[in-house]
Amino acid sequence: MLDLNQYLQGNPYPGRGIVLGRTVDNAKVAIAYFIMGRSENSRNRIFETTCDGIRTKAYDESKMTDPSLIIYHPVRILPEGMTIVTNGDQTDTIREHMVAGHCYRHALNTRTYEPDAPNYTPRISGVVKPNGAYNLSILKSLDGDPACCCRYFYEYDAPVAGVGHFIHTYQENLNPLPSFQGEPRTVAIDASSAQAWANQLWNSLNDSNKVSLFVQYIDLASGQRETVIINKHSQ
């Protein structure tokens, strides 16, 4: 099991990342999603709350040059309590398919990696069920070859107290950016509150590249959500 803070401190550009897991007292689901950026366009963003989650938004509209792939709803909550977390507009695809009675795999089989050659950024997605079980997925090119989309699905039906799983877009900070490799990383979650965990994660992300962070703790008994959003531009 990895120390997530050390893992992040050792990678200046993991890209976008999702962590799903359980708090150490086993009473709450823990969710984190962060975005990073190397270009001015990518860094010109904030997280903003919506009626059913959050969306990305340009911090300075006059500097936004291309909204495709960077403006989307990272988090959407379905009426029955299902939570969807992704790094792109596949959030809406998953939601639409679930509302129609299908599962997240059905939705993601209609999507591929992002069309941003030569990186072909993976689409990473997570779904948290009301009972605390969760799923993670990554859609990526075959070792940088866009002719093949590889779809991987990981399902955790009995989460363990104090343990989470972390998946991110880029293996390391190179050009072009290589896709995440292997299974989601098993990480420790030991923070007593969403705010404490958010502070840990934010302080561990590379200061030059970090853009925004969303953290949420969901009480399994009551369904109450403790949410923290940190935007670099608002600090």
Image: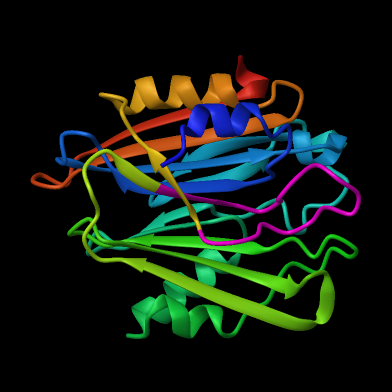
Q: Nearer the viewer, residue 100 or 179?
A: 179
**Rendering coords of residue 101 (x, y %):** 32, 85
Find out whether residue 155 is within the magenta segment.
Answer: no
Secondary structure mainly formed by the magenta segment: loop
Residue 61 position in % (x across, y down): 78, 37
Residue 212 in the figure: left or right of residue 115: left
118 is higher (above) or lower (below) than 220: below
**Percent position (x, y) of residue 135?**
38, 65
User: Which residues are drawn in magenta?
Assistant: 165-183
Above or below, 87 against 106 in this view is above
The residue drawn where x is 79% and y is 56% is 178
| Res. 141 image quadrant | bottom right
Q: Is residue 126 left or right of residue 35?
A: left
Q: How many marks?
A: 0
Q: Quadrant of the N terminus?
A: top left
* Residue reaching furthest to the left: 221
Residue at the image position 90 percent from the left and 63 percent from the top: 118
